[in-house]
Amino acid sequence: GQQLNQSPQSMFIQEGEDVSMNCTSSSIFNTWLWYKQDPGEGPVLLIALYKAGELTSNGRLTAQFGITRKDSFLNISASIPSDVGIYFCAGQPGNQFYFGTGTSLTVIP
Amino acid sequence: SQTIHQWPATLVQPVGSPLSLECTVEGTSNPNLYWYRQAAGRGLQLLFYSVGIGQISSEVPQNLSASRPQDRQFILSSKKLLLSDSGFYLCAWRTIDPDAFFGQGTRLTVV
């Protein structure tokens, strides 16, 4: 299956700090999505990106679809305690739907 | 509105026993359906996906199989469970919209 490499693997930050994470693939994707997963739950969509170079925001979250179509970035500004969780990128080369390895975020009050 | 049901929520099974996890979707037609497995603290590994009744694509050779007997029903099975089959199993669906919607997951522990 497709491998999406996500970094960093984990982050420990102070409340109020900004967060950046990225995802790369070995092949071109037509769509990039970012999800958040809380413990024991399924992932929930945060942002969807549909074309290369696209920059999209959802509140304090901003994501970008890389120009090469092989990468994507997610930024969280002014982190708050409820941002804690695991963040996943996901990409679609076709009917498949692949997820990244995840970034575990811990926000210290 | 669309909903997805996945059960059971937790399951403890002995090694060598069979497995059947079921996922049903309501409120949509002809969805793409997916089964994922997540090991503790790890990413989601795509196991199977289906674009229609009876159509199953396997992503990873393994001890599991999937079936889609009805348009909105997706079943994950095993004839004999291994310890390595333990994990958090998630079912998901999507249609034309690229977003995928997930069930609540099944926590499987093989002992």
Image: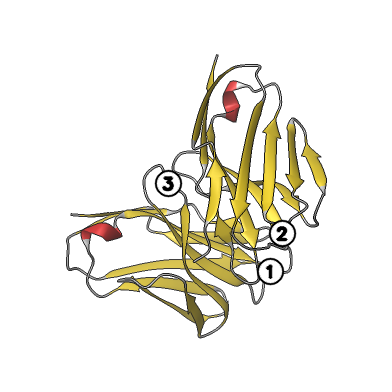
Q: Is residue A64 found left or right of A19 in the rendered image?
A: right
Q: Is residue B32 found left or right of A106 in the rendered image?
A: right
Residue visible at 52% across and 58% down? Answer: A3
Residue visible at 63% across and 21% down? Answer: A80
Q: Secondary structure at mark 1?
A: loop
Residue visible at 65% across and 77% down? Answer: B30
Q: Indicate the position of residue B105 as horizontal and vertical percent values.
A: 44, 54
Disc 3 marks which amino acid? Arg
Please give the chain letter of the residue carrying mark 3.
Answer: B
- Closer to the chain start, of discs 3 and 1, is 3
Q: CA distance from mark 3 to mark 2?
A: 22 Å
Q: Indicate the position of residue A57 as horizontal and vertical percent values.
A: 79, 39
Q: Secondary structure at mark 2?
A: strand
Q: Are marks 1 and 2 in contact (CB under 8 Å)?
A: no
The 10 Å Cα crowd at callout 1, few under 14, some 14 to 19, many 20 or more, is: some
Disc 2 marks which amino acid? Thr
The C terminus of chain A appears in which quarter of the rendering? top right
Q: Are marks 3 and 1 in contact (CB under 8 Å)?
A: no
Task: Identify whether A34 is placed above or below B28.
Answer: above
Residue designated by label 1: B95
Q: Is residue B33 found left or right of B76 in the rendered image?
A: right
